[in-house]
Image (cartoon, rainbow, N blue to C red):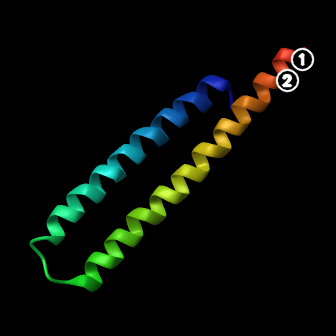
Amino acid sequence: MSDQERLSTLRSYAWTLELLGEALVQHDEMLECEHNPRLSFRNTAGIHQAIRIISRLASEQCGKVMEQAGRASTD
């Protein structure tokens, strides 16, 4: 994967994280109107899990870009 492809992937991850953050905000607002704590816990846990996974993937891609940049500067 080229650096450009990695940066594009990182941009997609950041955009997805932004959407998931917005989903959490909307979910919190919805909870004020609903009375099903079990369902709300599962939804929130699922969103948090998705955020953790995408953050880890983004971190891995950042590491690869930095590693290649380090190699390029020593060449």
Q: Which mark is residue 28?
A: none
Q: How many marks?
A: 2
Residues marked 2 and 1 touching at CB (< 8 Å): yes
Q: Is residue 44 left or right of residue 60?
A: left
Q: Is residue 60 left or right of residue 23?
A: right
Toward which corner of the image does residue 43 lie, by quadrant? bottom left
Q: Which mark is residue 74?
A: 1
The local secondary structure at tag 1 comes to helix
The local secondary structure at tag 2 comes to helix
Q: Is residue 10 above or below residue 17?
A: above
Q: Is residue 75 left or right of residue 35?
A: right
Toward which corner of the image does residue 46 lie, by quadrant? bottom left
State the residue at coordinates (71%, 38%).
63
Q: Is residue 48 left or right of residue 68?
A: left
Query: Which quadrant is the N terminus positioned in?
Result: top right
Query: Percent from the top left, x then y, of residue 38?
Result: 28, 85
Tell me the amino acid under the disc marked 2: Arg
State the residue at coordinates (45%, 39%).
14
State the residue at coordinates (66%, 25%).
3
Q: Is residue 34 above or below residue 57?
A: below
Q: What residue sits right under mark 2 in the picture?
A: 71
Query: Percent from the top left, x then y, of residue 64?
Result: 73, 36
Q: Which residue is situated farthest in the right direction here?
A: 75
Q: Local crowd at mark 1 within 10 Å, few (<14), some, or many (≥20)?
A: few
Q: Is residue 65 above or below residue 31?
A: above
Q: Could you tell me how far apart the alpha carbons at marks 2 and 1 are, in whole angstroms?
A: 5 Å
Query: Which quadrant is the C terminus positioned in?
Result: top right
Query: Percent from the top left, x then y, of residue 72?
Result: 82, 18
Tell me the amino acid under the disc marked 1: Thr
Q: Local crowd at mark 2 within 10 Å, few (<14), some, or many (≥20)?
A: few
